[in-house]
Structures are given as C-alpha cells and as structure tokens.
Image (spheres, grey):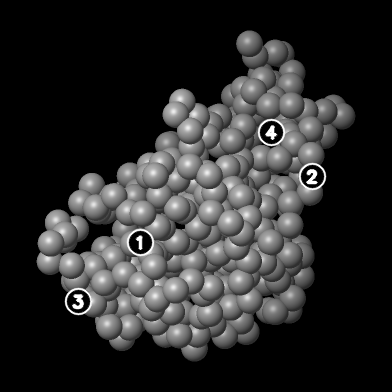
Amino acid sequence: MRTSQSADPRYYTAQEAISRLSVSRTTFYNLVNSGRVTRVPRPDRKQSVYLRSEIDVLASLDLVREDVSSGAPLTPPEQLAPGARMLLNAQHRLLEMFTHLPLYTEWLRPPTTILEVGCGTGRWALSMAEQYRDADVIGVERWEPPLSSGFSRGAPAARPSQGQLEPTWRFERVERLSALPFPAGSCDLVSMRWQARDLPTREWSAVVAEMARVTRPGGWIECLELGLLEGDGPALNQLKRWEETWLRGRGVTSLPDERELSEYLRGAGLVNMRTRRIALPVDGDGDGAALYAALTYFQRLTQIGSQLMQVNGVSRATYAETLARAQREVTRSHCVWPAALAFAQGDRPDTSSDDTP
C-alpha cells in the first residue's frame, strides 16, 4: 500500500521499493549502489525516493531475486563497477524478451556437448543446461567472472539424477579464446555472444577458426552481438562518439553486424549460413521490453562511464549532464539497439541429420 510520503506517482520510498521487489534491504541497497536503481534525493526531507518505473520493470521481470548477490562484492570483467553481473545477465534477458531465444533449438538435434565461448556470468550456459539436461554444457572465460548458479569447475558435471530440479554446467578458465582446451570436433553447439567490445577486431578470425575446430562436422556455431544505439539527438550522438573512441583504444575498429559475422564464419570454412538482424526498440517512456531496453542501455553507459570519461577527457559533470540529456532524447525519438545474429554448420555436415532448418 502506498504511503503519504510517496504521494508523487513517479516514486517509491525505500520500504515500498523493497516490498515491491521482495528482496532484503541489503540486496536493495546493492541495487542502488550499483546504479541499477536510481536514488532521487528529496530536499524537503531526509528520505530519498526511487523511480517507480525502474522498480516496476525489475519486479515484473523477476530479475532482482534471481541475479543480485545480497552479500559478496561482484568482480566482473575489466573491473567494472559492482552490478555488472546483473547487467550482463540483463543483456541476455533482453534478447530473450524480444526473440524468445534460443533462436534455433526447435530444429537443432539434441546436442551432447554445448560450449559457450566467453561465457561471462554463464547465463546462457545455464539456460542450455536447463533445456538439455543430458548434455555436457561448458562455459569458458578469460577471467573469473561472478557466475550464475549450477556450475562446477573442471571435470564434467554429474548428470541430474531423477527428480533433481537444478541443471548443471561447468566452467573452465582459459588464457585466450583462440586456444580452447578441447579436442577437434568435440562439440555439437558452440556459441559466442557479447564479446565484440572485449575482443580486438584483429583477433576475431582466429577465435572463430578455433570455434570451428572444436565443432563436429554438422554441428552448429552461433555468434550474437549488440551494436551501438541508433537514435537521433545531440547527446545520444555524443555518447556514441565517446564510446567509439573508447572502443578504438581497445583495438575494436567496428562492432560486427550480421554481414561481418557471417564473413567470419564463412572464412572459418562453415556452411549453411543463416543471419538475422534484431532491432530492439528503446523507449524511456515505454513499458515492458522497450523500457527495459532503455534502462539496460543507460545502465551500461553508467558502468563504463569512468572509462569513457578518462579516454575522452570528459569531466564527471559533463558526462552526467550528457547522460541525462540522452535519456530525455530517447523518450522523444525512435531509438533502436541493433543485435546481429549469424550461425552456420561445421563443414561436411552429417546428411543423416535433420538439423538443417
């Protein structure tokens, strides 16, 4: 029930937000400190309030209880601020909302070995373990990320016993994504997603070739990447330029679209190419998925803000002002966050299989 302290329909008090999300106070303030929930200071009283739109979207998606640690600090890749684990999971959830991922499992023969290259938090690996309970699901990463539940390390995870509800997958740390510790032709399905901002452009061909090496003839490889926001507005364009400068400093000359992804796959000798462009609408005044996309997009810019400021020589005040103006521009223009998908089969496909869509 709403109280008189939060009569403004735009806001919840802390207690109202905690109740709406069904989380502990510790978890809630982890959300606030990570920037996932916006704190709004009120000059007329000591108590801060919180944006109702953010709380309602998080609650409706059941994201908080599943993805937020209530205790230990998070240590995501590239030393991003706490909360990056939830952001990585949010990107996966965002594509699920728009595309009902996985995108091709309705025609994929039940795989026995599934590999995620650059698994991050392991959200996709866990979803595959949930769908294919008899498969050996593996996630590899170059660092020790804060992982989702259900994983083991090193040896193959034990198969769920009859009546066991929790799916299992295993995590292995690797030095380079272009040197995977698996035999040739050992995987039925290999996926790589959300790597373009961390993988220098010059390394893509070698990584995809290594993915092709470990894929069985007739097995499938998938690449899925998010591009830069497509929208019109001075602040949005400025943020895009700052991010492009930051990316170039990381050796990323472009974020591959579906055509470029297909070229990498074709160059690795793969066949039966399929591509898809997914346009994610972004609307700060929208509801459901479009609002969630806006919150996820700006949360990401908040997470990498210190790096963008340092690389571009921008003050904290200027960056915050630009971010605020961009959030207003999103509500006035038709913005799209493009995602590119390409997938293909290992050469010499097994003609006895019915895997081809």
* Label 3–label 2 contact, CB within 8 A: no
Q: Amino acid at mark 2?
A: Ala
Residue carrying label 4: 50
Q: Amino acid at mark 3?
A: Arg
Which residue is located at x 41 percent, y 41 percent? Answer: 133
Residue carrying label 3: 348
Between circles 4 and 2, the one closer to the viewer is 2
Horizontally, is 179 left or right of 33 in the view?
left
* Label 4–label 3 contact, CB within 8 A: no
Q: Which mark is residue 72?
A: 2
Q: Amino acid at mark 4?
A: Tyr
Residue 230 placement (x, y as % from top left): 41, 65
Between circles 1 and 2, the one closer to the viewer is 1
* Label 4–label 1 contact, CB within 8 A: no
Residue 233 placement (x, y as % from top left): 47, 64
* Label 1–label 3 contact, CB within 8 A: no
User: Upstream in the sequence, badge 1 or badge 3?
Assistant: 1
- Marker count (numbered): 4
- Mark 4 vs mark 3, CA separation in Å: 56 Å
Between circles 3 and 2, the one closer to the viewer is 3
Q: Give the quarter of the image for residue 308.
A: bottom right
Residue carrying label 1: 189
User: Upstream in the sequence, badge 4 or badge 1?
Assistant: 4
Would you call the spot at circle 4 few (<14 residues within 10 Å), some (14-19), or many (20 or more)? Answer: many
User: Upstream in the sequence, badge 3 or badge 2?
Assistant: 2
Q: Amino acid at mark 1?
A: Leu
